[in-house]
Image (cartoon, rainbow, N blue to C red):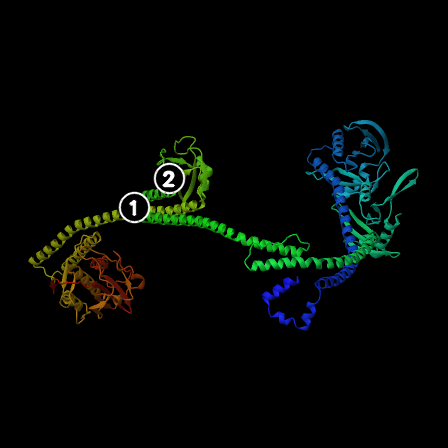
């Protein structure tokens, strides 16, 4: 020990050598290790032994109380359980008999059957002493086993004579034992108690007919379930002596006891030889009378009862479990009182009494033994301390030397492990284990490296498979999303899955939920199997499988019989069926087949589910596209029919209107030749003018219809012409100047100073501007202004804060508008005095639409002018906007500026 300590000091704290010169440290270094190890331990042991002795005595006192309480709790609980078990049987029997009568399984008016029934029932329940049934007609049948099997029979005709028959083992009557008088069964106490209570109830404790014991009966009235009329009373009894015998069998303590007492103080049973009743001879008859606990012949029972009465005044006052102590002549006792009640009204007290002397004898003996053991322990500790001090030095020196060698690099050092001191032995074992661990560490590192490499390979393989599956899913998704062909989508999904997963086969089926059939639309087979493509199968053929698929759940199973393919019977496949589903429902399913030796792993199942979901999305898109295409074709067909109709009708109307116009002109010339003038025939010329105006109006309508039809059909050619706006616009506006003056309107033209040439379709632009000026002149009140402006603006700032009706269109001659930010040509026509309601501005460019109640001048109109303007603007790849507020309405047209040279037309 000292050598090892010196080694540690030299290694870790060399400076402590000089510090040893300190008087305190030097003094303690001179103490022998044997004294250092022995004396402190001895002092500690003496103190501990003395403390343990005192604690043992104190703990003994506490143990007495605790053991007494535990024992009393256990005894009282056992008694309670015994009472519940023993007294439950008669309650159970009476309930059975009540149900048997009420359910017509037992007839009270059939005495022979009733006797056999009671006999066999008594044979089944050994714990009851007798079973009785009395009826309202005065019949009584009772079977008991007192002194053998007996049948008690009382009929109304017997005049109170009860016949006591002895029964054999089969329940047959062997002989009449005797008769005795009994009152009417309906007047017997147990019968009347049940009738008065109208529910199951216990009888009072009564003397058995053989005068040998006390009995307690459970009684239940029997009522007709339909009429509620009382039919009789069923009863079953137990003898009190069984309870007394059970209490006597309990092992409590040397002088401890347990007894059961009623609330009136009468004893039910005790664990002593003292009987709970006394026998009295009265008038030549034996009478059993219950004994009061306070008058018991047993002194401990009597003293306990008196103590309880003294403390509580009455047994009825004890309503909760009680733990009590009492003292009599200097002797303490422990009392446990446990109330026992049941649903039939039984109310008893279980009392467990244990004198303290039953425990203290052993406790005192244990205390003396403890003192002797403590003294012996002190002597042994002294000897062991001296012996241990000599045992420690040698193993500590060996351990010190081995440790120094290990520190110098010799890892083969070992020390003896069989040592008398456990701590040093543990240290030696730890030292040897450390040496062995150093040798095994390299091997463990190699094993760990091998395991790690294996795990890395497995993880790498899983990661590679996950990446491959992710790439496959992405590839399939891109293909099916890019395709709107349903057949190509199904073919791509099936082929890619079959090739990538190495399947023997893969097919996709679509459902018809109305006919509940599944049809294979495409399959891919890697083996020579019969094809199932195009075949249908009823879902009811495999209802469990398709119910699972329709609930959006996959199914994996071993297919052992052909469904759609005529393959050999021994062909077996590992099959995965996955529903093709989206948020709107299940469209079909994917079936994948591989060899039955290989199941689909979770990664493969997850991949198939994701592919099935993408397939469902693509199928839904394809079907929506097909529906949209069908609707587009239908609309195009209707549009062509409409255009053909308008074109035909317009042409058919144009010829007669031209004839009407010509006839009107000829009529006017004829009138002039015959000398009729406007002055002489004012009404004739007025009618003629109306005819001319209406004819011109109809011709304009027909022309507008034809122009709109050609615009909608895209047959109107685009003829680009370069114009000079400064000269061309005034030329177009000039015819409207005179008209405006006649209507007392002011027509102004405002052109920007620098207007570059504009390349556009000349006839279309002229038609647009003329139509807008015609509307302005028509709807502008007298005294108001009409302003036509033209300027160049940037596209980004040209669009006003008004509603746009732009619908870009392209023709072969014009590829489209210029890039954003390029200059555009802006023409606007503004008139004052009129305003278009805001809620009507979005519809004024619709065909045949006229603003309700906004034509106070009754000019009329076809509702085609602005629609034609819009169509022509779109043909020129321009935009038209409208603004109307504060009594002003402005139509603005934006046209792209053409690039390049062209023929300039100036008007």
Q: Residue at x 21, y 48 (%)?
A: 644
Q: Please provide percent x and percent y for residue 401.
A: 61, 59
Left or right: residue 796 versus residue 651 is right
Residue 460 place in picture, x, y as percent: 42, 50
**Rendered location of residue 692, percent (x, y):** 15, 57
Binning the other alpha carbons within 10 Å of mark 2 as few (below 14), some (14 to 19) or many (20 upward) gives: many
- Which callout, 1 or 2, points at the residue further toward the start of the chain? 2
Does residue 307 show up?
A: yes
- Res 244 label: none
- Asked whether 16 or 796 is in front, the reply is 16
* Position in image of residue 339 (x %, y %): 77, 50
Residue 159 in sight here? no
Q: Secondary structure at mark 2?
A: strand
In this image, 328 relative to 639: left or right? right
C-alpha separation, residue under disc 1 versus residue under disc 2: 29 Å
The tag on residue 507 is 2
Crowd rating for badge 1 (residues with CA inside 10 Å; few <14, some 14–19, many 20+):
few
User: Label 1: which residue?
Assistant: 630
Q: Can you tell which of label 1 and label 2 is closer to the viewer?
A: 2
Compared with 782, 503 (above or below) is: above
């Amino acid at each position: 020990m000292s050598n090892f300590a010196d080694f540690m000091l030299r290694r870790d704290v060399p400076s402590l050598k000089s510090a040893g010169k300190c008087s305190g440290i030097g003094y303690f270094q001179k103490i022998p290790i044997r004294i250092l190890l022995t004396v402190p331990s001895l002092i500690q042991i003496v103190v501990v032994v003395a403390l343990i002795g005192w604690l043992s005595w104190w703990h003994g006192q506490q143990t007495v109380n605790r053991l007494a309480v535990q024992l009393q709790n256990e005894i009282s609980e056992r008694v309670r359980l015994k009472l519940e078990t023993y007294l439950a049987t008669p309650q159970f029997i009476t309930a059975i008999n009540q149900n048997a009568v009420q359910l017509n399984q037992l007839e009270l008016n059939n005495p022979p059957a009733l006797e056999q029934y009671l006999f066999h029932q008594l044979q089944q329940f050994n714990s009851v002493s007798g079973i009785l049934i009395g009826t309202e007609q005065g019949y009584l049948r009772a079977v008991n086993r007192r002194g053998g099997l007996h049948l008690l029979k009382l009929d109304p005709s017997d005049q109170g004579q009860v016949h006591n028959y002895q029964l054999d083992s089969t329940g047959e009557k062997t002989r009449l034992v005797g008769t005795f008088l009994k009152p009417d069964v309906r007047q017997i106490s147990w019968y009347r108690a049940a009738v008065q209570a109208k529910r199951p109830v216990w009888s009072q404790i009564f003397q058995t007919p053989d005068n040998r014991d006390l009995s307690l009966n459970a009684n239940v009235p029997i009522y007709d379930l339909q009429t509620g009329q009382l039919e009789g009373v069923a009863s079953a009894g137990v003898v009190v002596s069984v309870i007394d015998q059970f209490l006597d069998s309990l092992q409590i303590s040397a002088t401890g006891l347990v007894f059961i007492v009623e609330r009136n103080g009468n004893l039910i049973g005790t664990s002593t030889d003292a009987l709970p009743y006394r026998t009295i001879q009265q008038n030549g008859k034996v009478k059993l009378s219950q004994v009061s606990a306070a008058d018991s012949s047993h002194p401990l029972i009597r003293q306990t009862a008196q103590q309880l009465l003294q403390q509580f005044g009455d047994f009825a006052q004890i309503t909760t479990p009680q733990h009590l102590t009492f003292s009599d002549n200097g002797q303490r006792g422990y009392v446990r009182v446990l109330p026992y009640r049941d649903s039939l009204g039984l109310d008893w007290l279980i009392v467990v009494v244990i004198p303290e002397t039953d425990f203290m004898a052993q406790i005192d003996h244990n205390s003396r033994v403890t003192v002797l053991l403590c003294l012996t322990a002190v002597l042994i500790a002294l000897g062991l301390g001296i012996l241990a001090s000599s045992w420690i030095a040698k193993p500590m020196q060996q351990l010190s030397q081995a440790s120094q060698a290990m520190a110098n690099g010799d890892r083969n050092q070992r020390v003896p492990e069989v040592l008398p001191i456990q701590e040093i032995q543990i240290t030696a074992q730890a030292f040897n284990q450390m040496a062995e661990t150093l040798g095994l560490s390299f091997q463990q590192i190699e094993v760990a490296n091998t395991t790690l490499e294996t795990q890395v390979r497995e993880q790498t393989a899983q990661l590679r498979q996950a990446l491959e599956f992710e790439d496959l899913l992405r590839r399939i998704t891109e293909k099916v999303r890019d395709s709107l062909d349903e057949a190509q989508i199904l073919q791509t999904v099936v082929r890619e899955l079959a090739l990538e997963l190495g399947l023997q086969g893969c097919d996709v089926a679509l459902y018809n939920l109305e006919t509940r059939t599944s049809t294979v639309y495409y399959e891919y087979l890697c083996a020579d199997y019969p094809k199932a493509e195009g075949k249908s199968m009823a879902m009811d053929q495999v209802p469990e499988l398709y119910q699972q698929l329709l609930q959006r759940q996959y199914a994996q199973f071993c297919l052992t019989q052909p469904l759609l393919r005529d393959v050999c019977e021994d062909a077996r496949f590992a099959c995965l069926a996955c529903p093709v589903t989206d948020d709107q429902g299940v469209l079909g399913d994917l079936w994948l087949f591989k060899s039955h030796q290989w199941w689909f792993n979770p990664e493969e199942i997850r991949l198939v589910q994701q592919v099935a979901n993408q397939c469902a999305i693509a199928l839904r898109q394809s079907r929506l596209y097909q529906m949209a295409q069908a609707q587009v074709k239908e609309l195009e067909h209707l549009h062509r029919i409409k255009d053909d109709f308008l074109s035909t009708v317009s042409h058919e109307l144009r010829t007669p209107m031209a004839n009407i116009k010509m006839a009107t002109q000829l009529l006017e010339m004829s009138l002039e030749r015959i000398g009729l003038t406007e002055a002489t025939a004012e009404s004739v010329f007025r009618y003629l003018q109306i005819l001319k105006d209406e004819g011109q109006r109809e011709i304009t309508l027909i022309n507008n219809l034809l122009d709109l039809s050609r615009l909608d059909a895209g047959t109107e050619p685009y003829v680009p012409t370069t114009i000079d706006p400064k000269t061309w616009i005034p030329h177009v506006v000039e015819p409207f100047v005179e008209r405006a003056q006649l209507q007392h309107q002011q027509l102004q033209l405002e052109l920007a100073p620098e207007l570059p040439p504009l390349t556009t379709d000349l006839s279309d632009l002229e038609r647009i501007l003329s139509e807008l000026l015609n509307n302005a002149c028509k709807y502008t009140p007298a005294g108001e202004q009409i302003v036509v402006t033209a300027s160049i603006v940037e596209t980004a700032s040209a669009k006003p804060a008004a509603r746009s009706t732009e619908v870009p269109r392209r023709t072969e001659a014009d590829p489209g508008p210029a890039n954003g930010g390029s200059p555009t040509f802006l023409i606007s026509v503004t008139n004052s005095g009129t305003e278009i309601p805001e809620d009507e501005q979005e519809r004024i460019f619709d065909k045949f639409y006229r603003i309700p109640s906004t034509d106070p001048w009754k000019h009329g109109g076809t509702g085609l002018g602005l629609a034609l303007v819009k169509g022509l603007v779109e043909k020129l790849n321009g935009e038209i906007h409208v603004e109307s507020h504060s009594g002003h309405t402005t139509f603005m047209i934006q046209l792209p500026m053409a690039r390049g040279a062209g023929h300039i037309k100036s008007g």
